[in-house]
Image: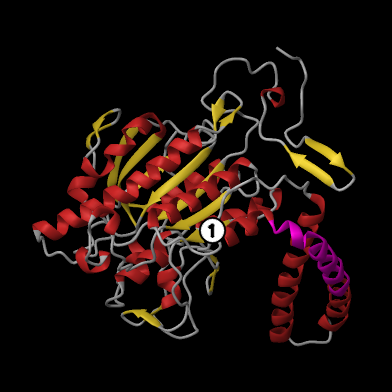
Amino acid sequence: MSSLQLNRRTVLRGGVHTAIALPLLDAMVPAASAAPLAADATAPNRMACIFFPNGAIMDQWKPEGEGRDFKFNSSMQSLEEHRNDLLLLGGLTQHHARANGDGGGDHARNASAFLTGAQPRKTSGADIEVGVSIDQAIAKRIGDQTRLPSLEIGIERRRNAGSCDSGYSCAYSTNVSWKAPNTPTAKEINPRLAFERLFGNPEAAASAERRNKFRKSILDFVSDDAKRLNGQLGGTDRQKLDEYFTSVREIEQRIDRANHLRPTEIPEMNLPDGVPAELTEHLRLMYDIMILAFQTDSTRIITFMVGDAGCNRTYREVEVKSGHHELSHHRDDKEKKEQIARIDKYLVDQFSGFLTRMKQVKEGQGNLLDNSMILYGSAISDGNRHAHDDLPIILAGKGAGTLDTGRVINFEKETPLNNLFLSMSERMGAPLKELGDSKGSLKLG
């Protein structure tokens, strides 16, 4: 065995303008850590939150048993091979997805409250407001360690304006990631554009560098001018200027990251020119882009919507010709419930395939999934009742050795889902004191 020790950030240089980043190698692992580990301490922890719409048929979703002695139910059978990599969490509630006096609109609240833990303001106008989502709260703290602070992707592109659900803005239904209470983080549904968001377009690299230099010089000028002006303004205008100045600083930071983070070789990947017509192919491509993003350490935080809230897609892949949302109001109709269960299983099967491919990427003595936390779930459980308690929540991966997986944990009734997010923020090195109605982090180690 070689005694060579490499830094995690080592690159191969092929010339003055070429540098190729390396994945985690055994030579990057200190020799002292020869004992087998579930995950490697030199690898970063990653986090992804995958949202699915319309709830689930819970009596075919929930596993039988508790602790390590459990049996998967029909909707999650394909996860059997990943049994030891999962935490199946019961009893979690997203209280602010409930009406709480605001009437209908459970699907819009489902998506908007899912990661924010906040009650969305009921409006179909421009005055949207909900909260900062957990992914963006963490990205704000550690996003400067990677080329992209976060990546937001999805399958459907629907409008962000107008009313989509009982007087709620479409922005609430089409986004789970929120950078600010009134600013959703736009997701990308085109695999090629998502790929270029990560790695850029090599043909545009030179012009991008020129643009960045120009922007930097302009920003320097604006910065100096703003400082001189600030002392002459009233309180309200100073606040407005401060908000503007904050956005200027964010652009400066993005330019600095682009200039100082070492580039990575652009991976080879066959990508269609547009959005794939087949859902299975679309899902697989987006999942594979997530793997590349984590493998190359391009970002450590991803959100993925496999369907927008209230999605009424048909699933001909499993011979379901009626709309998903329409079926979710099944009123205990046996045939409709059976069709929804097929959708649930289909989506879990795609998720399971993603986990399989994550585990095929080796990192040190473990693999990519070992060094990740992948949340799969929704803020609706029973779509027929629009229930927001005892949610369908899976947490996959060992969180860089911080999670004791292979268990079913049923928490006390009405335990906030936001407690889980506090636990995840701690494991990402960006601990939060609170989110929504959180009451403290969960014990998952």
Q: Quadrant of residue 82?
A: top left
Using the rendered image of the protein, determine whether residue 439 is visible from the camera's viewpoint.
no
Q: Which residue is mark 1?
A: 272
Give yes or no for residue 257 being in the magenta stretch: no
Give yes or no for residue 201 being in the magenta stretch: yes
How did the renderer colour the structure?
Answer: secondary structure
Residue 349 to residue 438: above or below: above
Looking at the rendered image, the quarter that the N terminus falls into is: top right
Residue 229 screen position, x and y as percent: 85, 83
Horizontally, residue 234 falls left or right of residue 416, namely right
Q: Give the residue displayed 77% in from the left and 22% down from the top.
A: 5
**Secondary structure mostly seen in the magenta stretch:** helix
Residue 112 screen position, x and y as percent: 42, 67
Q: Give the residue displayed 59% in from the left and 28% down from the top.
A: 40
Residue 232 screen position, x and y as percent: 83, 87
Residue 326 to residue 393: above or below: below
Mark 1 crowdedness (10 Å alpha carbons): few <14, some 14-19, many ≥20: few
Q: Nearer the viewer, residue 360 or 9?
A: 360
Looking at the rendered image, the quarter that the C terminus falls into is: top left
Q: Which residues are magenta?
A: 200-218
